[in-house]
């Protein structure tokens, strides 16, 4: 009461210094009292404190300007009361527009296609707004980046959120999402450490998110049954919060474990239950998963009906909707053996899609389409195009499209060379594999200069790869290994320039370094990533050295290949057979054949056949591997029969 009396007395006398001092004391008292309770602190920061300050300042300013007039003094106090009442009634939109702004921002990012938003700055924070608003805004932005697989962008944003002083509930929420990012980046131990220290009993609203992160951790460690159970629990806990992505992932896990009927049920639910609320990217994935599963189970009529729905919704939509649809239409056409669909897709991409994309996206889409067409090509020697016109019309059509796209790439070659190093390396590897297959025919002649420039690019890329590896942050374990694998790929281009006596030693050092990274994946319990890493190492070693004869160093590398092939076999056997391992089955069979491991080759050849998956669904190099393995197995059977 005394403080209130002094305050009004000061207002009446117009003593500005005293007024400001008393205001400061009042505000400080509110902060100290409220800070003892976390839920109060949030309330005071955003609503109570701001309203008190605004109301008092209006009163003070009005009273000081018109301190001798009773009418204007009353007007000052009345204006403060009006402001407070309006704030209570219309707090979302008038006095505190932050929540409205957040809703509009979230709606914007949900509607925004990732390709359209790639250049959005992650520092787009509105000046003068509260810290809680900034934190929530950053969460929306990070979620958008994470949903679209931009792990680096999401990681940068989460580091910014960490720079704020967070309440326990906010820190828990942040750590749950960080655990997801760590799993995706290959830092499984880091994710496990975060989740193991977490007690969400005080924050029931975070339980669904916690279960989703725990499921991703279990899947990364190869525990698919546990991952499936955790996602099912998350779905029961809060289906609205779990969303289409979770339902789709649950279907994927059921599919990986060979339960096609349950997988189909979840895919259908993911696609049709949420209606227009589903993000276009998620809906596109749901359509594709469901169609693929129908084809796999021989339900071609259902596949056709679902494909037509996919076509209706996406083929006439925005440019990125068209890109998604026509890219998948090529895959679907290959699965059902429909040449018209394939040719229509290629024409639509070249005529309708690519010209409408931004410059950078045009180049990436062009090379991606080239790879897709190459993957469609039959496993036959690349002959002259005229020799195929009559004898093999299907191959002729495919080769015509392939050459058309290669000429388009040659025309855009200088622009492609200006892409960022990370994307350029990826695209150049695809081009190199395609041109290597043409190298033994006269078809290579128009592209021989590009082929030579590709070899020079890889030879000169070692320093750039080193810089890229050093720039990667702590969580990005798997990406670091991928770039080390790229270093091994690039190392093969040194072979012709190096002294042949020095080459095996140099290669051994590179392989030893990669072994350290594989050990890091194993130490992280990143089982699925570890299997992929071991197979990639075997692939690069066998592609780089002569595995039939060589020095003692080469023989040592061969033995390392045998070792990692056996470890990959052990890990897959422990996890259990899943259809998601189909390409790995073919790769292990091929490497085992190359190394003379007949029983291992036969084991994984039969494992692939048992899945019932058509080999035509896979990329060109996997189908090439399978064709060679099949010939090898048949010859083995013939020899054993004799």
Image (cartoon, helix red, strand yellow):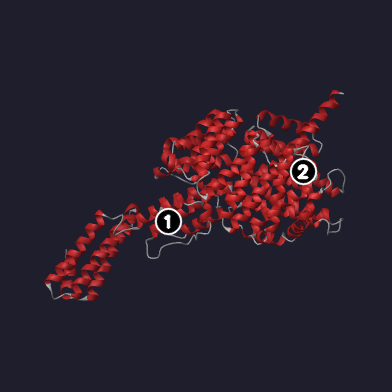
In the rendered image, residue 245, in percent from the top left (x then y), is placed at: 50, 41
Is 445 situated left or right of 316 in this image? Answer: right
Per the image, the residue denoted by label 2 is 561
The residue furthest front is 390
- On screen, residue 583 above or below 495: above
* Whether label 2 touches label 1, CB < 8 Å: no
Q: Earlier in the sequence, mark 2 or mark 1?
A: 1
Is 507 situated left or right of 94 in this image? Answer: right
Count of picture labels: 2
Label 1 residue SS: helix
Camera-side mark, 2 or 1 = 1
Q: Residues within 10 Å of mark 1 (few under 14, many from 20)?
A: many
Q: Residue at x 30, y 57 (%)?
A: 47
Question: Is residue 581 something that shows in the picture?
Answer: yes
Q: Which mark is residue 137?
A: 1
- On screen, residue 614 above or below 59: above
Give the spatial CA distance, label 2 vs label 1. 49 Å
Q: Residues within 10 Å of mark 2 (few under 14, many from 20)?
A: many
Query: In this view of the protein, which residue sits in the foreground, 357 or 103?
Result: 357
Q: Residue at x 67, y 48 (%)?
A: 370
What quarter of the picture does the N terminus occupy?
bottom left
Question: Is residue 516 something that shows in the picture?
Answer: no
What quarter of the picture does the C terminus occupy?
top right
The residue furthest left is 70
In the rendered image, residue 372, in percent from the top left (x then y), is placed at: 66, 45
In the rendered image, residue 552, in percent from the top left (x then y), is placed at: 86, 48
| Residue 636 sits in quarter | top right
| Residue 42 sits in quarter | bottom left
């Amino acid at each position: 009461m005394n403080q209130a009396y002094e305050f009004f007395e000061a207002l009446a006398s117009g003593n500005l210094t005293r007024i400001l001092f008393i205001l400061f004391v009042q505000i400080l008292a509110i902060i100290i009292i409220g800070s003892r309770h976390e839920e109060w602190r949030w309330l005071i920061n955003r609503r109570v404190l701001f309203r008190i300050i605004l109301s008092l300042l209006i009163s003070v300013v009005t009273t000081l300007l018109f301190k001798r007039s009773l009418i204007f003094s009353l007007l000052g106090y009345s204006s403060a009361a009006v402001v407070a009442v309006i704030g209570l009634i219309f707090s979302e939109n008038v006095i505190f527009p932050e929540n409205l702004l957040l809703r509009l921002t979230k709606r914007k990012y949900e509607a925004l296609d990732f390709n359209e938003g790639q250049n959005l700055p992650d520092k787009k924070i509105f000046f003068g707004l509260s810290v809680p608003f900034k934190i929530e805004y950053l969460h929306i932005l990070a979620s958008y980046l994470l949903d679209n697989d931009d792990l680096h962008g999401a990681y940068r944003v989460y580091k910014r959120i960490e720079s704020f002083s967070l309440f326990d509930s906010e820190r828990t929420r942040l750590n749950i999402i960080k655990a997801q990012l760590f799993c995706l980046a290959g830092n499984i131990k880091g994710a496990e450490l975060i989740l193991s220290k977490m007690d969400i009993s005080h924050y029931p609203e975070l339980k669904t998110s916690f279960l989703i992160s725990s499921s991703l951790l279990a899947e990364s460690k190869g525990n698919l049954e546990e991952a499936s159970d955790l996602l099912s629990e998350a779905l029961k806990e809060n289906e609205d919060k779990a969303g289409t992505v979770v339902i789709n992932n649950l279907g994927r896990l059921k599919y990986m474990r060979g339960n096609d009927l349950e997988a189909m049920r979840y895919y259908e639910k993911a696609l049709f239950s949420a209606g227009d609320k589903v993000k276009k990217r998620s809906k596109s994935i749901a359509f594709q998963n469901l169609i693929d599963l129908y084809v796999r189970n021989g339900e071609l009529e259902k596949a056709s009906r679902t494909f037509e729905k996919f076509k209706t919704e996406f083929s006439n939509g925005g440019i990125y909707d068209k890109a998604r649809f026509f890219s998948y239409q090529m895959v679907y056409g290959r699965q059902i053996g429909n040449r018209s669909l394939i040719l229509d897709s290629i024409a639509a991409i070249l005529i309708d899609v690519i010209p409408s994309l931004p410059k950078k996206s045009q180049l990436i889409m062009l090379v991606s389409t080239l790879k897709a067409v190459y993957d469609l090509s039959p496993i036959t020697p690349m002959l002259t195009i005229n020799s195929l016109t009559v004898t093999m019309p299907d191959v002729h059509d495919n080769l015509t499209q392939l050459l058309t796209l290669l000429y388009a790439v040659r025309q855009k070659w200088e622009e492609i060379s200006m892409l960022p190093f990370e994307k350029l390396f990826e695209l150049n590897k695809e081009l190199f594999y395609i041109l290597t297959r043409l190298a033994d025919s006269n078809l290579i002649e128009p592209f021989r200069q590009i082929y030579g420039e590709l070899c020079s690019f890889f030879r000169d890329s070692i320093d750039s790869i080193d810089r890229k590896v050093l720039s990667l942050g702590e969580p990005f374990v798997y990406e670091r290994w991928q770039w080390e694998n790229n270093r091994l790929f690039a190392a093969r281009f040194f072979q012709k320039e190096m002294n042949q006596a020095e080459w095996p030693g140099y290669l051994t050092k590179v392989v030893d370094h990669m072994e350290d990274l594989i050990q890091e994946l194993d130490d992280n319990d990143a089982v699925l990533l570890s299997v992929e890493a071991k197979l990639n190492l075997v692939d690069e070693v066998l592609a780089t050295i002569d595995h039939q004869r060589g020095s003692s160093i080469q023989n040592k590398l061969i033995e390392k290949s045998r070792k990692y092939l056996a470890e990959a076999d052990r890990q897959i056997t422990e996890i259990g057979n899943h259809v998601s391992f189909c390409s790995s089955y073919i790769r292990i069979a091929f490497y085992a054949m190359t190394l003379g491991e007949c029983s291992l080759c036969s084991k994984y050849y039969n494992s692939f056949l048992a899945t019932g998956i058509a080999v035509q669904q896979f990329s060109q190099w996997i189908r090439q591997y399978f064709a060679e393995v099949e010939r090898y197995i048949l010859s083995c059977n013939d020899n054993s029969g004799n």
